Amino acid sequence: MSHSDEHLQSVLETLEECRRVLIASNSRESAELLSIVILDVRMKLKGIDDADLKALCDEMLRSAASEPSSPSKQAQVQPRRPLLRVVK
């Protein structure tokens, strides 16, 4: 692990602790925003770039669209506003 990766790992651990504190203090929106930052740092550590993430999201959308859904499943799922949107 390079010095840069070690530094990012340390930052990641600090961010995760901050997220735990935010969740415990009932600051859900702030914790969700911090989750996006944590995802970005993890992507850097694993060498995943924006194009890889977009390809994953596209595949997940294709898979979800091709799955047959039952009426009871549709009634249970509440549409949510996306937390993260990849913009190119």
Image: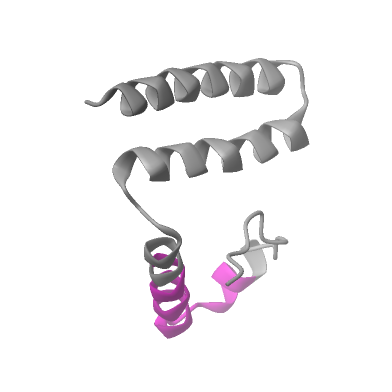
Q: Is residue 34 left or right of residue 9?
A: right
Range of residues picked out in magenta:
56-74
User: x and y percent of residue 47 in the render?
Assistant: 31, 48
User: x and y percent of residue 62 in the render?
Assistant: 43, 80
Q: Where does the N terminus fall, quadrant-wise?
A: top left
Give the quadrant of residue 30.
top right
Q: Where does the C terminus fall, quadrant-wise?
A: bottom right
Measured along the vertical axis of the image, is residue 43 above or below residue 20? below
Extreme residue toward the left, this view: 1
Q: Is residue 61 magenta?
A: yes
For the point 45% across and 61% down, the residue is 50
- Name the dominant secondary structure of the magenta segment: helix
Measured along the vertical axis of the image, is residue 79 above or below residue 33? below
For the point 40% across and 43% down, the residue is 44
Measured along the vertical axis of the image, is residue 64 above or below residue 85? below
Q: Is residue 84 magenta?
A: no
For the point 70% across and 60% down, the residue is 80
User: x and y percent of residue 21 in the render?
Assistant: 66, 15
Give the quadrant of residue 25.
top right
Q: Is residue 58 left or right of residue 18?
A: left
